[in-house]
Amino acid sequence: MAKELSMTSRVGSDNQRYGPKGERLVAGVVPLSPDKTRVLLIQSTHRNGWVLPKGGWELDEATASAAACREAWEEAGIICKVERDLGHIPDTRPTTAVTKNAPKASYQFFEATVTEERADWPEKHKRTRQWYAYAQAVQLLHSRPELLEALRRSSVRK
């Protein structure tokens, strides 16, 4: 019995969880096709490029995987089943790249199988989604070491 999916993306950081060093806790998914041959990427809203669905783990969410699935819905319009925890990935950006709008983060990614792709979703107006084979995804994520590491840890067919 799935709870109703909101068509409104969460915004703001009032409800954001932070780690012991003040880092923003970010949860995301590596959304795979059922046969694990492809990964679903979404367009970044900040730069031209592709990213994995991810976002802040919020205080009213019991688990990071619940936050990751919510982000997958809001950003990619997908319903997914979490298969396994890919662990924590540190933010490797130099301090010069850390800003008030992009504070240091600690990433926790989950491998998930996409069970459904909906035609409408909260961020459809600002993002597209696209399936890629591993080699293509690696090229597209090359400037984001934390996303590449999550992809590398997943069981996508390499």
Image (cartoon, grey):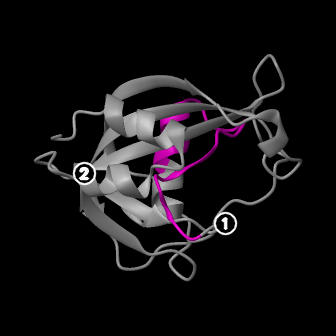
The disc placed on residue 46 is 1
Q: What element carries label 2?
A: helix
Location of residue 128 in the rendering, given as x and y in whole percent from the top left corner: 44, 75
Q: Give the range drawn in magenta.
A: 48-69
Q: Can residue 26 be seen in this view?
A: yes
Q: Which of marks 2 and 1 is in front?
A: 2
Judge left or right: residue 156 versus residue 48.
Answer: left
Location of residue 111 in the rendering, given as x and y in whole percent from the top left corner: 33, 36
> Residue at the spot x=28%, y=57% of the render?
136
> Residue at the spot x=56%, y=73% of the render?
123
Q: For label 1, count other residues whose C-alpha is less than 10 Å away and answer few (under 14), some (14-19) or many (20+).
A: few
Residue 20, quarter of the rendered image:
top right
**Quadrant housing the C terminus:** top left
Q: Which residue carries the number 2 mark?
A: 135
Q: For label 2, count other residues whose C-alpha is less than 10 Å away and answer few (under 14), some (14-19) or many (20+).
A: few
* Sequence-earlier tag: 2 or 1: 1
Q: Is residue 110 above or below residue 135?
A: above
Judge left or right: residue 77 versus residue 96.
Answer: left
